[in-house]
Amino acid sequence: MILHITNDYANTPVYKNLIINLDANSIEQIVYTPVKSEKSIGNNWVELREKKSNIIYSNILNLHTDRALFNIKVSKIYKDIQAKVDINNIKLIHAHTWFSNGAVALKLYKEYGTPFIISVRSADLNQFWKLPHLKTIGIEILKNAKHIIFINPSYQERFTEIKRIKNLEDSISEKSTVIPNGIDPFWIDNVQSKRTQLSKPIKLLYIGQFTKRKNVVKLIKSIQKLIEQGVQCEMTLIGGAGNQNKKVLSLIENDPNFNYIGRINNKNELKRVLQRSDIFTMTSLKETFGLVYGEALSQGIPVLYTINEGIDGVFEKTIGVGVNPHSIDSICAGIRKIINEYDKFDFIPNQIVEKLDWKNITVKYLKVYESVSKT
């Protein structure tokens, strides 16, 4: 029996797809997810075939205090798991973040001796590791974790460059693996050929929330600058909401070169929009992986992404261009490069989706689980 500890299960389909595929491989598992609101209970719930498997939603987190008081949050989750899960039946714990979930797994390991593995995500490197009071616990988690999973190779490279971790470099490299996130089977079943010709005007696309992390304001300003410089292009934005929603909408309100559609839940409709686009653009400040990059690539569209974040390093450079998200000039240059060398971005969508197929990704997780169980 595997215990998954994941604070974000209810908010993203990433974990659900992994759980479904593990279940299809007859893996018994308990998914424990603490949530901040009753509204999150039941999100991404799936009926699992394995009778002993279960998904436990626990409304024990406070939106404000638990974010600030790390140790109190960890203690709260630790005690709640002990009350709701028979740890003696657990053979392996998968903590789906290095810090928030890994700290809980470490406490369970010390109490019960249950081995654990961790996944390293954006908030771990870009937020928690930068807090001085958490560095000691961070190192202790690394030392005791039986395996470390990186969602993208850029994070693995950045990880081993951290001075305090360098002393552990050999042991970390021996017990670490890069395993990317997968995309929904819909995109694998509907893969398209590589797009070869640009539209007139060139059609750019963004899909996602309008948050500071997603950096949409700077992306829009970059495209507006390109248009001022004579580049004939237009942009469609899908999604919205978030802490910069009003600012984004005000920026494009009277600009005929921008088309805001809003959220699209129907995958067939989203597929049609992607197939009408030339370049997918998302220059997030921080991004663990970015499933929407994979969705765009499955439809044959090159992508503009952020260097050292998200999909950077997952595929060959022919999928698109990585840029500095803080620089309008870098974003503009990246878009220009894709436009001017459009035929050189010759990736094969079928190969992309094969790497992002959850069935293939799950095999990699099974190998990790098996290797840890044998130690």
Image (cartoon, grey):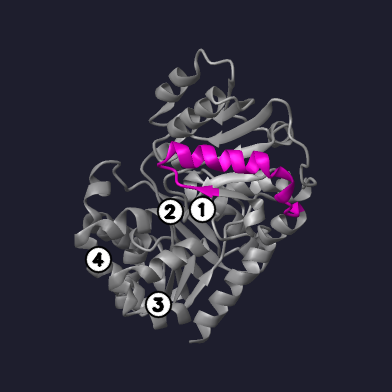
User: How many angstroms separate mark 2 from mark 4 (CA)?
Assistant: 24 Å
Residue placed most toward the observer, 58 or 291: 291
Few, some or many residues within 10 Å of mark 2 (<14, 14–19, 20+): many
Which mark is on residue 310? Answer: 1
Q: Amino acid at mark 4?
A: Lys
User: How many angstroms separate mark 3 from mark 1 (CA)?
Assistant: 31 Å
User: How many angstroms separate mark 1 from mark 2 (CA)?
Assistant: 24 Å
Q: Earlier in the sequence, mark 4 or mark 3?
A: 3
Residue placed most toward the observer, 279 or 245: 279
Q: Position of residue 140 (x, y in %)?
A: 29, 74
Is 343 magenta? The answer is: yes
For the residue labelled by badge 3, is the local secondary structure a helix, a strand or a loop?
A: loop
Comparing labels 2 and 4, the label whose residue is closer to the camera: 4
Relative horizontal placement of residue 67, taking residue 6 as reference (left or right): left
Q: Earlier in the sequence, mark 1 or mark 2?
A: 2
Q: Earlier in the sequence, mark 3 or mark 2?
A: 2
Residue placed furthest toward the bottom: 375
Q: Is residue 207 above or below residue 118?
A: above
